[in-house]
Amino acid sequence: MTDPKVFISLDLKHNLIELILFVGQSYNTRTNWDIMDWSFKEEIPEETWIEKVKEKINKCNLMIVLVGKYMKTATGVNKEIQIAKECNVPIFGVYVDGTDVSSDLPVGLERFRTIPREWEKIGKWIDNCLEEGKNEHHLLEYLNKN
């Protein structure tokens, strides 16, 4: 299998710095993975946005949600999580920007699948996600070939 493709979901308005730090430090995991930067730089109609986001998420092996302080108002994150679930793309979250287990989570992200920004744990969750959802099929193909 090639390096897994990861869709990063976040509240871009409030957590751009956390995204930059997360991407810059991503080499700290023992797992190789490609982060897809598919954020929209301009406003587009919601119907078009949903269609394009679905296409992008569906090309990924998993989604990581960066959980910041303003998740209650991050409606785009809620929609991206819903789309990932529809596409059978596994999801986990990472607390950023001083958030922790007492912080609000976006709709659809489970607390037990949300972890601190510790790179060893992030690597393990990436590995776990590669055995879930749409990736189960690819894993079975790989195991059957070897």
Image (tube, rainbow, N blue to C red):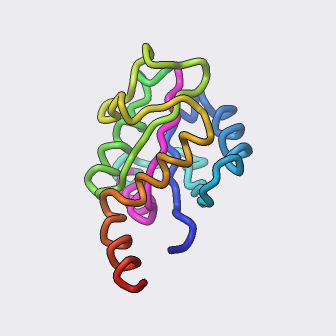
Residue visible at 52% across and 35% down?
66
Q: Is residue 126 above or below residue 113?
A: below
Q: Quadrant of the C terminus?
A: bottom left
Which one is nearer the viewer's eye here, 51 or 131?
131
> 27 left or right of 66?
right
Which one is nearer the viewer's eye here, 12 or 47?
12
Q: Choose top left, top right, bottom left or bottom right for residue 56.
A: bottom left
Q: Is residue 15 magenta?
A: no
Q: Is residue 66 magenta?
A: yes
Residue visible at 60% across and 18% down?
98
Residue visible at 48% across and 44% down?
64
Residue visible at 34% across and 51% down?
84
Which one is nearer the viewer's eye here, 138 or 7?
138
How many numbered markers are drawn?
0
Q: Residue furthest left?
A: 86
Q: Is residue 27 above or below residue 5?
A: above
Q: Residue furthest top?
A: 102
| Residue 61 % position (x, y) | 44, 61
Q: Residue furthest bottom?
A: 145
Magenta segment boundaries in residue numbering: 50-69
| Residue 90 % position (x, y) | 36, 51
Which one is nearer the viewer's eye here, 101 or 145?
145
| Residue 1 % position (x, y) | 50, 74
